[in-house]
Image: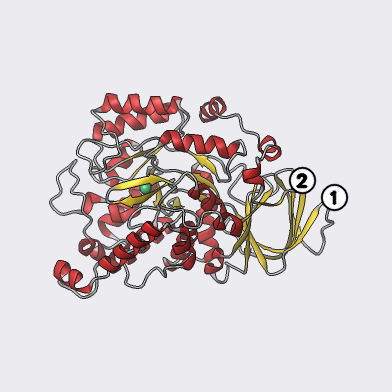
Amino acid sequence: MKRLLLALCLAYSPLIAAQNLLPEVRKFVKVDSPVVALTHVRVIDGTGAAAREDQTVVLSHGKIESVSDAAGVKVPSEAQVLDLHGYTVIPGIVGMHDHMFYPVGPGSFGEMSYSFPRLYLAGGVTTIRTTGSLEPYTDLEIHKAVEEGKIPGPKMHVTGPYLEGAGSWALQLHQLSGPEDATRTVNYWLDECVDNFKAYMFITHDELAAAITAAHKRGAKVTGHLCSIGFREAASLGIDDLEHGLMVDSEFTPGRKLGECKDEEDPVLMGKLDVTSGPVHDMILDLIQHHVAMTSTLPVFEMGTFPGRPTLQGRILDALAPDARTLLLERIVRSNDAAAIRKRYGTDVSPWRAAFKKEEEFEYAFSRAGGLLLAGLDPTGMGGVLAGFGDQRELELLVEAGFTPVEAIHTATYNGAQYLGELDHIGTIAPGKQADLVVINGDPSRNINDVENVETVFKDGIGYDSAKLIDSVKGQVGIR
Ligand SMILES: [Zn+2]
């Protein structure tokens, strides 16, 4: 059913796309020989297996042809050879909370149709799920333009407009009028070729139930950033994935009425929850039993939670437009204001610090118990979490949460591909798969921060110049 849906929506051939790259894309291409040999490279293949040293990876006509010890391999004579001593390749990242929009003012978000596709690709993200769309038609057009070789960017699974209920704070969202509206909305957007949906904070039980039924009937999946509905309630309705983790689960709020969204996370309460036993652990097991995935979005929570964290990197400030940069700096100063924290919480240390730590513990426990953990960035919140850069930060924070670097990379590649039903052709470095892989200077299996040193990103065997892509969006994020 899913294949039927996709087949009607987009007849995609990577080879045709490769031949048809327009100059606007071609200028970022560094390697485009039909056959390429990456020699003497360290391979982290995305399966969770340990890094393998001194490998040769042969790419042929958009696909991975072979992965083998460099010593024994005969490199095809027609291959362009890249000697990658000191480099590592990982599979292209599959970003699972990767919006095309960015906060441009209080409660207002602008579509970054120019800068974000470039930044995702530059950051090593070769496939994204947009996970909630404010301009679904723009996202669909970006998708089409990338596939047709008109703009540089990642492969896209476009999510429909947010499925939101009455009472929302967000002006850019349609508020459903009931279950019939939910069914109608889902079917309309499936006809328009989205393949995922995201329920939002104020959706009702009946609306969510109707949306899930309609989506599943046609092979699409539903995730949620929920508030009016607790995680276990959503699992019982058949939801496929939950965004953000424990931080947004309302079911542990004392005195909460069913169906109510107070739209206020309680970091003090959250910091005290036990994730290894009791109700939270029961919830984890319940979700796993219902095959509900969980999307980690640690970068958006890190921003504004810790004084001095994250380090405000020059590359982020450079990418921001002057107004966006000012807005971000003001917000950081405000969120770190000790007097305000003392006044609000009666302590000198913000309770968000413990809540963030708890979120990390929760995600680790969910994965260890057998849950499918997905990785995203969520480029919203206070701003400063940017396409591509934020996906790399997510890997670093998964390691902080307790995963080994190789496990974190597995989460951000293999797991996403599995959820999207694409594991047969992306998500790992293996013969026969699409040649989507990221060339990194250094060894992220030892130091995960090396994932920031992306030099070349292969998508369907074509190598894009990361630095050039980043350079092309300087001062643009926040505007376009
Ligand atoms: Zn989101």
**Depth order, front residue of 435/210:** 435
Q: Position of residue 400 (x, y in %)?
A: 43, 68
Distance in Å between CA atoms under marks 1 and 2: 9 Å
Task: Establish if 178 lies above or below 96.
Answer: above
> What residue is drawn where x is 63% and y is 49%?
436
Q: Ligand 1 within 8 A of label 1's CB?
A: no
Instruction: Give the amino acid at mark 2.
Output: Pro
Disc 1 residue type (three-letter): Glu
Q: Are marks 1 and 2 in contact (CB under 8 Å)?
A: yes
In what element is the residue under mark 1? loop
Colour scheme of the picture: secondary structure
Determine if residue 478 is in view: yes
Report which residue position mark 2 lands on: 34
Pinpoint residue 89: horizontal percent, then vertical percent.
64, 59
- The one of 115 and 234 positioned closer to us in this rendering: 115
Residue 469 lies left or right of residue 304; in this view the side is right
Relative horizontal placement of residue 163, taking residue 202 as reference (left or right): right
Judge from the rendering whether residue 308 lies leftward or rightward of residue 42; answer left or right: left
The earlier-in-sequence mark between 1 and 2 is 2
Identify the image quadrant of residue 90: bottom right
Dot 1, how many residues are within 10 Å of its Cα: few (below 14), some (14-19), or many (20+)? few
Q: Residue at x 22, y 73 (%)?
A: 338
- Residue 398 in the image, given as x and y percentages of width and height: 45, 62
For label 1, the residue is: 78
Against 67, is 62 above or below? above
Asked which secondary structure carries label 2, the reply is: loop
Around disc 2, counting alpha carbons within 10 Å, would you say few (fewer than 14), some (14 to 19), or many (20 or more)?
A: some
